[in-house]
């Protein structure tokens, strides 16, 4: 079953993000940031089908090199909380071959992004998936928010214009000076642009479905926009798709699965963050000299040290070592099930889960709002059922209506 997912976020310094690290992850490469003086190495990442940079005609040719491009952008942004790049995450269609998906992705990037003057660094991922789960091929696109001028130098993202009232007179600020507002120089970040791009991707997918003689279609609109009285589902990951494949399709099941998935993700984020903060830093510091270490190797060394300490206990030494063995086995099994081998992959999974958790929280808020409305309707109906007999008795009285009314008010 075709699944539509077209999500846009920003890479921001205010979130502690580096656009070099983001680009390295998407391309599965090792890139060095001259801005931060550190490398991001994702050369062991699996599932990267392809990665390439598409340049508009006026862009310097050296920006075809990923490290050169994103280092130039980092240095062009001076603000501590600067927005660096737009990040698109777009699901590809399992009904199309990988070659067809790549062709469609390239056409979208060239015709809708690069033709507007944007530089687009895009990659296609086809992640290793759990047994029984549907494939989840998708696109990552990084686009600098700051535009390039025709001479190949970086331009400005916003300009200030005077604020005028309805009569065309200048509006003053609280200090009595001319008020200004910031306006994008490109329109790339506008809501209208996002709506257009989402609709454009919908059209491209549906045209391809029609070309292949398939009846399936996708729709970029939300359930609410389509007038469907239903709590919207989130974009399905591999685990949810595996459940759907078992035939669980009821409306109540959808809501329960949404809540269950949110709780599961929230729990995983809490556990993983705690584990990261308490263990990863220490493991990296102590075992940095190990050539290309894995998380399993880190864990084994860590628990070997814990067992060494446990043997010095006067009491319950064996119990402590048994607990360590159980924790080691459970953690390695979890990492194996999730196809996580390195600290970098674990950190990236945390970011992905945080993003999914944010989307799920939004859906749960909408679901809760609908439930509250339903509760109000149910209460109104209960009140109606309670007082209807009294009203019927009052309506059928020919004499003594006022007396009956006053008696009811006293009660």
Image (spheres, grey):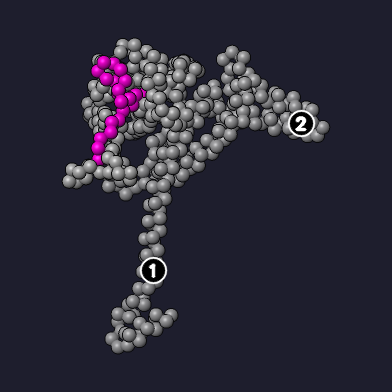
Question: Magenta span has 143?
Answer: yes
Reading the image, the residue beneath label 2 is 318
User: Residue extending furthest front?
Assistant: 176
**Image quadrant containing the C terminus:** bottom left
Helix, strand or loop at label 1? It is helix
Q: Which residue occupies 30% across, 35% down?
A: 182
Q: Check residue 207 for magenta coloring.
A: no
Does 317 sit left or right of 287 as displayed? Answer: right
Q: How many marks?
A: 2
Question: What x and y, as percent, mark residue 206?
Answer: 25, 31
- Residue 142 placed where, x, y %? 36, 24
Q: Which residues are magenta?
A: 142-163
Q: Earlier in the sequence, mark 2 or mark 1?
A: 2
Q: Dot 1 corresponds to which residue?
A: 383
Magenta span dominant secondary structure: loop
The residue shown at (30%, 80%) is 395
Quadrant in which residue 93 is drawn: top left
Screen quadrant of the N terminus: top left
Q: Residue furthest bottom?
A: 399
């Amino acid at each position: 079953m075709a699944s539509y997912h077209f999500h846009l976020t920003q890479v921001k310094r205010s979130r502690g993000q580096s656009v070099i690290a983001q680009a390295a992850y998407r391309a599965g490469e090792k890139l060095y940031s001259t801005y931060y003086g550190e490398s991001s190495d994702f050369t062991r990442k699996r599932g990267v089908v392809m990665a390439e940079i598409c340049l508009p005609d006026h862009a310097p040719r050296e920006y075809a090199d990923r490290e050169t491009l994103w280092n130039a952008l980092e240095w062009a942004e001076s603000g501590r909380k600067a927005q660096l790049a737009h990040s698109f995450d777009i699901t590809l269609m399992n009904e199309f071959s990988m070659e067809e998906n790549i062709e469609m992705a390239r056409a979208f990037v060239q015709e809708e992004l690069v033709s507007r003057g944007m530089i687009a660094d895009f990659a296609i991922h086809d992640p290793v998936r759990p047994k029984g789960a549907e494939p989840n091929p998708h696109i990552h696109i990084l686009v600098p928010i700051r535009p390039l001028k025709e001479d190949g130098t970086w331009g400005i993202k916003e300009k200030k214009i005077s604020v005028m009232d309805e009569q065309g007179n200048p509006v003053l600020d609280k200090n009595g000076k001319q008020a200004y507002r910031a306006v994008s120089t490109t329109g790339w970040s506008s809501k209208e642009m996002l709506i257009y791009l989402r609709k454009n991707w919908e059209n491209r997918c549906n045209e391809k479905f029609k070309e292949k003689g398939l009846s399936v279609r996708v729709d970029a609109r939300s359930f609410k926009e389509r007038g469907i009285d239903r709590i919207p589902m989130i974009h399905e990951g591999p685990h949810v798709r595996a459940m759907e494949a078992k035939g669980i399709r009821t409306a109540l099941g959808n809501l329960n699965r949404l809540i269950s998935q949110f709780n599961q993700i929230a729990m995983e984020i809490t556990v993983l963050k705690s584990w990261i903060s308490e263990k990863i830093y220490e493991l990296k510091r102590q075992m940095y000299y190990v050539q290309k270490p894995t998380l399993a190797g880190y864990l084994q060394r860590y628990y070997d040290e814990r067992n060494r300490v446990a043997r010095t206990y006067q009491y319950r030494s064996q119990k402590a070592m048994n607990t360590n063995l159980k924790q080691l086995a459970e953690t390695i099994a979890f990492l194996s099930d999730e196809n996580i081998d390195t600290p970098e992959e674990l950190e990236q999974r945390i970011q992905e889960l945080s993003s999914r958790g944010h989307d799920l929280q939004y859906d749960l808020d909408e679901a809760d709002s609908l439930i509250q409305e339903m509760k109000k309707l149910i209460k109104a109906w209960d009140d109606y059922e309670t007082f209807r007999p009294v009203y019927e008795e009052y309506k059928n009285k020919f004499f003594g209506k006022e007396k009956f009314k006053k008696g009811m008010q006293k009660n």
